[in-house]
Image: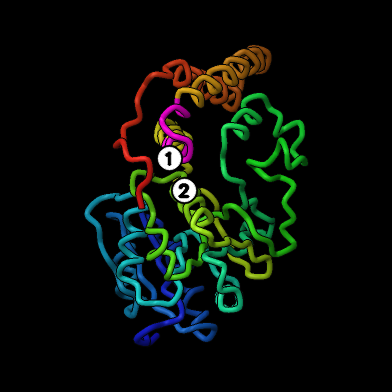
Amino acid sequence: MNVPLQPDVSVIIVNLNTRALLDACLESVCKAVAEATMEVIVIDNGSTDGSVELVREQYPNVHVQVNQMNEGFAQPNNDGMHLAKGRYLFLLNSDAELRPGAIRRLVQFMDERPEVGACGPRLVYPDGRQQRSVRGFPSLWTHVCDMFLLDAVFSGSPLFGRGEMAYFDYSNTAAVDHTMAAAFLVRREILETVGDLDERFSIYYNDMDWCYRIVRQGWQIFYVHDAVVIHHLGSTVNERNRNFGVFEELYDNTMLFFQKRYGRWAVPVYKILLAVGFSFRVVCWGIAYMLRPSDHTRERVRYSWLSFKLGVRFWRPLPYGNEETRK
């Protein structure tokens, strides 16, 4: 795969110990070389499973940057975007595989719509089932709906279900607030007008924050239904999730998003709502566990209790600087 001076697309893949998935991902990218001119950049986050050796031996035209440790999601993607030469920057998870025609369709769509700053494809599970990859921007209202289960009871309502958007029609291309960055094509001008990913977000909400800033700068974001990418959802973080390894990390990033959007006052409000909402869940899941003990109900009790305690400590400051925004 020869890289032209300015390819259409720079594919940026961040990897951490997903050798087999990375191999499948790169194979799908290489098969797409006829769809657009491309360069491929892999940023490795200190893998110990032979991922780097695989890329160097099997994919010699792929540029590899090796980090000595896990740098998360935002920083390595930023590094990749600043190395990239393409007209478009394509953030692609190592656990994703391109279906034929996906790159061609996304590039075509962006070329035809100069007002669109970024777009995402249809994400499907390996068995072809639809993934819910579109979300609305979180707000204090969507948080209220979540804590009081209004979004579950009225999931088909744009008023109460705006956060999860369970009602979204994935069979049609449409403008959206946010589409999952497992596969996310961005116009190069976004780096100049909006800035790159905020590195204070470690692994969650960095793409949501970026989408919010893109839209706020006047660009549109689209979901493109007829470009398809297979996504092995959660392969890189499932074990940490099972062990609650990302618990406080998730909440810190969520609250940073609210602080950036509304100001510092929004964080204690968010936490108070968290405490109220999870006090109810602690009781309900506690009763469920007593009536029918299982690993699932025990995990739900623990998660609810930890969330409730975090909400009660509403005065706890965030472990970040005081900037209202950061590019």
Label pair 1/2, CB-CB below 8 angstroms: yes
Q: Position of residue 168 (x, y in %)?
A: 72, 51
Residue 240 visible in the current orientation: no
For the image, the number of numbered tags is 2
Q: Nearer the viewer, residue 124 or 218?
A: 218
Report helix, strand or loop for mark 1: helix
Residue 215 got which mark? none
Residue 130 vertical placement versus 30 (above, below): above
> Which residue lies at the image location 56% right of the left edge and 78% below the top edge?
111
Q: Position of residue 165 (x, y in %)?
A: 68, 45
What is the quadrant of the N terminus in the image?
bottom left
Q: Which amino acid type corresponds to the residue marked 1 in the rendered image? A: Lys
Left or right of residue 62, residue 250 in this image: right
Residue 164 vertical placement versus 122 (above, below): above
> Which residue lies at the image location 57% right of the left edge and 37% below the top edge?
139
Q: Which amino acid type corresponds to the residue marked 2 in the rendered image? A: Asp
Q: Position of residue 264 (x, y in %)?
A: 41, 30
Left or right of residue 65, residue 185 in this image: right
Which residue ends up furthest to the left in the rendered image? 68
Residue named by callout 2: 209
Q: Position of residue 291 (x, y in %)?
A: 68, 13
Boundaries of the magenta span: 256-267
Instruction: Say which quarter of the image contains residue 22.
Output: bottom left
State how far apart marks 1 and 2 are (Cα). Answer: 9 Å
Q: Nearer the viewer, residue 260 or 92?
A: 260
Q: Look at the image and say whether residue 263 sits in the magenta stretch.
A: yes
Q: Which secondary structure class fits the magenta region best?
A: helix
Residue named by callout 1: 260
> Which residue lies at the image location 30% right of the left edge and 65% below the top edge?
52
Residue 56 vertical placement versus 235 (above, below): below
